Image (tube, coloured by chain):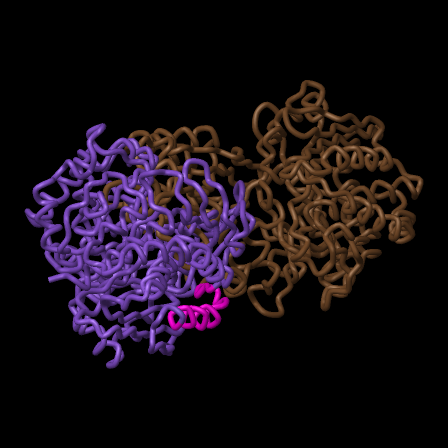
Chain colours: A purple, B brown
Amino acid sequence: MPDENLKSPEKQAIDQAQPARAGESPLDLEPASRRAFLQGAVATTAATAMAISMPQWAQAAASAPDMDAIRKEIEKRHEESLRRLQTWIHQPSIAAENRGVNEGCEQTMQMLRDAGFGQVSKVPTDGQPGIFAILDAGAPRTLGVYFMYDVKQVDPAEWSSPPWDAALVDKPGLGKVVVGRGAVNQKGPEASFLAALHAIRGAGDKLPVNLVLVAEGEEEIGSPHFPQIVRRPEVLAALKNCSGIFMPSASQGLDGQVLMTLGAKGVVELELVSSGERWGRGPRRDIHSSNKARVDSPAWHLVEALVTLVSPDGNTPVVEGFAAKARPISPEEKAMVAKAAQRLDEAAAKKSLGVQHWINDVSWEQALEMLVSRPTINIEGLVGGYTGPGGKTILPGRAVAKIDMRLVPDMTAAEALAALKAHLAKRGFGDIEVNMSGGYDPTSTPADSALIRTETAVYRHGGIEPVMLPRNAGSWPGYVFTGDPLRLPAGHFGLGHGSGAHAPDEYYVIESANPKIQGMDGAVASYVDFLYAIGNAG
Amino acid sequence: MPDENLKSPEKQAIDQAQPARAGESPLDLEPASRRAFLQGAVATTAATAMAISMPQWAQAAASAPDMDAIRKEIEKRHEESLRRLQTWIHQPSIAAENRGVNEGCEQTMQMLRDAGFGQVSKVPTDGQPGIFAILDAGAPRTLGVYFMYDVKQVDPAEWSSPPWDAALVDKPGLGKVVVGRGAVNQKGPEASFLAALHAIRGAGDKLPVNLVLVAEGEEEIGSPHFPQIVRRPEVLAALKNCSGIFMPSASQGLDGQVLMTLGAKGVVELELVSSGERWGRGPRRDIHSSNKARVDSPAWHLVEALVTLVSPDGNTPVVEGFAAKARPISPEEKAMVAKAAQRLDEAAAKKSLGVQHWINDVSWEQALEMLVSRPTINIEGLVGGYTGPGGKTILPGRAVAKIDMRLVPDMTAAEALAALKAHLAKRGFGDIEVNMSGGYDPTSTPADSALIRTETAVYRHGGIEPVMLPRNAGSWPGYVFTGDPLRLPAGHFGLGHGSGAHAPDEYYVIESANPKIQGMDGAVASYVDFLYAIGNAG
């Protein structure tokens, strides 16, 4: 979904989080397992620096043939990489408004060609086109890459620097950042990944892995046609060779920490529309409110329907059959959450979210466990009748609840939607329209998959012990890769920091003034390291 | 309340209604009682014309000393009267926006002086000022008059003729109408009443009754300070001498019918605000919706509270104590409704309202009975979280329901509000803010009061048998007059037609092309007749 991959609920928390025990570095937590992972993932010596600069980071990837040269290329090409990102941001590409999408697609295809992809083709769908690209490096291993080239809508009036200017701005405490729509979601991390390809080639090296890239231009509207791209025979055939699929991401919080998730909840976004038109009772349009004495109310009808969906405290879905296939959290997942709870700062999370109490006043660990394991039915918005200031004496002909439902394995979007419809019909609310606007199934990737092990190892290699959670409570369309027929590991990766996805003044750090956070060159180096680690993965 | 006096639920119906039996004129319904009423009200011969022109109408008021001269004055002063209305409309006076209210007050005071009021004073309140004016004609009887000088907000973009231009526009089927904000609500009818005073004086006659006028500039925001105007000792003292109080009104529907009501329901308008801030649970602002798994939802909290207010079909208030003092409909009122049901056209009402079924599929007579006798709790609007197109994955920190509650005698606004608050507190929703924005008690006037009998007689005199209902299901602040300490009859009166109160292209008919509807001169004549009838009332 639109904001999920970057705005996971814990991302905000991490932005403000400090290690659970003051003075304790992430690496101190599990030195033994860290070393084991590193050895299993990349054949290199363990990193020693705690907070390392870009050159150290790139240098440490011992398996790269000429890491000094690559490091110099990254530095040399800093301006070129920044300009590429700025050029990318200059082109709005907004599926929700059908604005500049084709231009954005063509531009992205050209950037892929420039970065060394030999085969780059546009993939038509029933919606906006996708991209299928292959970089054949003649390497033994192949890595899948997932790009989005669309961005979220903007209200330019809310921005301190115009959203398409991609201006380089000094941000106190952070350094120089690019401000623009798409800066962090997702063009910044994607541009850093492309810069890594340029740097490796510029250093005279061959890429250590082949790449198969799929891109979509509808991520921000819920990826409705992404399966049409991935499930084309030639795309499936190419992806089947991959050891995993990753999306470039600015994964560092403000404290430098990285949160990794082994998948994500599924989601269904929908509108429940109660109308006199459809109900056959109540008015077809807004009428004077005094008529309530003799005319049924579609707004009350909606409220009565809504209240049947959840427990009286509004917290537990009670839609019949909705969560029938919800898999309970496993002992391994519980242990993982318990570890994460030690690392993540509850007070910072509560402050960041503006909440005083978790549901039922549960503990931090329980709250994290609920976050990753509970299916939900949430009201995103209520819109009915008069919505302006003060009152207006009308009986509205129509009222709408905007709902999202989050799904855990083994629930599916289709089954959740069907359960909701059946539930409403059974309780006398069959007239209420259920208009699904987007959504997809949960996605899960095994902790012991090569992709996750390699990602973890590379982070540790860079001095960062990632915080691991069984899944992101947000959603991303990873199910297309992790589900049938591919069943591949899929996840996000990348150092660097940014924020403001879907909000004004979205930014991506270019030159970091915070020693815990990597700037663009550091992010580029993390992709270089990752590519060599994947290439060398056993 | 804002739209009540002109947009009664039956007004729309009457606009499209035909007599219940085709070809049957209203007067044919009850000839015997009609004659009895006429004799009791004004000492004059019964009118014979079924659809009469203005001159006939004015001529027929036999008790006026020089009706021919007055009729000629009305015609002679047509342009002057029209210009007065246009000048009035040119001045916006919007309490909700605090726009031009003082100017509107001064302008209205000057118009009252011009019309012969000898004493005109501005009455300060905690809100916008009111007006207290006396026209001492040395007559034995005194009539109270209620004016509003404020108008509803406008969105000029929605108007085909600018709202402050007061342009004279040809309206197909209706004739020449003034289009402007306040045209019918309430400056048109009020201007016609003032024109009646000018015409009587212009004809060299003295007014047959003394007048005590009270005006407010906050009718459109629920008359919050009107009691402060009426309950001043000097105003109370003057009003105590009145035989009744009336508001000029364009009472004719499109078919020429007039609906009279013996009062109106009371109303309470309020917002129910559920917020994390106030609740102490849930977020203080909108957060990512995936947090629903661990964070309470103020939106669900609101829905759960709302559903406790009404029966499961959304139609019957179940707030404890809310309707405890609701007086059941009396046999006399039932009979009155039954008669009205014969006169009013159910199909036209349903068409006008856009409804196919009344609540529980009751009959037309039952629907009318419910309309006048049932207290209601209505949702005017729902506003929470994301209200734009599509969805947005947030858990809103705040959600609001805009509610109106309609009250029947002997309920009071204060008691209804207190019952609602106690109900919410008792059920665990005491944190939900109950913000009352306006409202007042029900108002009732006896059918056998001199005011109502005279109004009825004058209508009949003009060939119109009014349809009578026990009360308007809408609301107006008549309680200030009908309640303690005055306990005076109060109602609306006036021929003429207009529509679009609170809507774009509000209009008032100046020159009628529809023989069943009076234009401005006819409306003026109806006030002349009414004043003489009141002056002569036994």
Q: Which residues are magenta?
A: A93-113
* Most foreground residue, B79 or B301: B301
Residue, far left: A331
Q: Is residue A264 left or right of residue A447?
A: right
> Hey, which quadrant is residue B535 in on the image?
top right
> Hey, which quadrant is residue B128 in on the image?
top right
Give the residue at x 83% y 45%. Answer: B195
Q: In x, y percent, where is residue B422?
A: 35, 29
Give the residue at x 22% y 37%. Answer: A344
Tell me, yes or no, if residue A306 can be seen here: yes
Q: Is residue A103 left or right of residue B28?
A: left
Give the residue at x 51% y 60%. Answer: A90
Magenta part, dominant SS: helix
Q: Is residue B309 left or right of residue B109?
A: left
Tell me, yes or no, if residue B368 can be seen here: no
Q: In x, y percent, where is residue B379?
A: 43, 46
Q: Quadrant of the N terminus of chain A?
A: bottom left
* Most foreground residue, B538 or A277: A277
* Most foreground residue, A290 or A234: A234
Whether the magenta-drawn stretch holds residue A96 is answered as: yes
Whether the magenta-drawn stretch holds residue B129 is answered as: no
Figure check: A98 above or below B498: below
Residue, far top: B233
Figure check: A87 above or below B5: below
Q: In x, y percent, where is residue B16?
A: 60, 63
